[in-house]
Image (cartoon, rainbow, N blue to C red):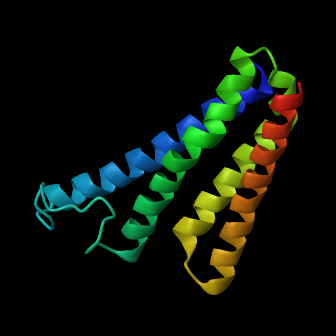
Amino acid sequence: MSPTLLALLGFLSWTLCLLVLMEAMRAKLVLTRQVPANGFAPDNAGLSPFMQRLARAHANCLEGLVLFGGFMVLAVIAGKAQVTDSLAMVLLGARFVQSLIHLASTSPMAVSARFTAFAVQMGIAIHWTIGLHGA
């Protein structure tokens, strides 16, 4: 499997992992009758700060998957994976870091670090855009 497809698999798997964690925690809240089954807001409002950060981290992955995953799929389909292969795993690592920081804290330092991880992903996407146009 090419680095691009491996990174895409990792991105999808990470997004799924966050979703499974969130739904397992929600299921526990329902089973322990702390929250009714229909009592969840999409952003986990009214729940713990961690649950709210988890919902946002998952949403960030979904939002990013369309853009970053789209470039990876496009590169592979177009036979231009050489454009994305070299930085695909860096992008995935930056996504992991962004999500983990999001789950850990919302302090000003954490938010700045999280933005830095996102900026790395944006820079890679810009690089890929230029590379795919020129390849």
Q: Nearer the viewer, residue 73 or 5?
A: 73
Residue 2: image location, x then y, percent: 78, 21
Quadrant that contains the N terminus: top right
43 displayed left or right of 107: left
Q: Nearer the viewer, residue 9 or 60?
A: 60
Considering every residue shown, the one lying at the far bottom of the view is 108
Quarter location, residue 87? top right
Identify the residue at horizontal 73%, vertical 49% (top origin): 93
Residue 107: image location, x then y, percent: 59, 84
Compared with 131, 29 (above or below) is: below
Q: Nearer the viewer, residue 27 or 128?
A: 128
Identify the residue at horizontal 40%, vertical 51% (top origin): 21
Quarter location, residue 48? bottom left
Quadrant that contains the C terminus: top right
Considering every residue shown, the one lying at the far front of the view is 133
113 displayed left or right of 24: right
Q: Is residue 85 visible?
A: no
82 displayed left or right of 53: right
Residue 47: image location, x then y, percent: 28, 72
Identify the residue at horizontal 75%, vertical 28% (top origin): 4
Q: Is residue 24 visible?
A: yes
Residue 49: image location, x then y, percent: 39, 76
13 displayed left or right of 132: left
Identify the residue at horizontal 26%, vertical 56% (top origin): 26
Question: How many circles with numbers are drawn on the protein?
Answer: 0
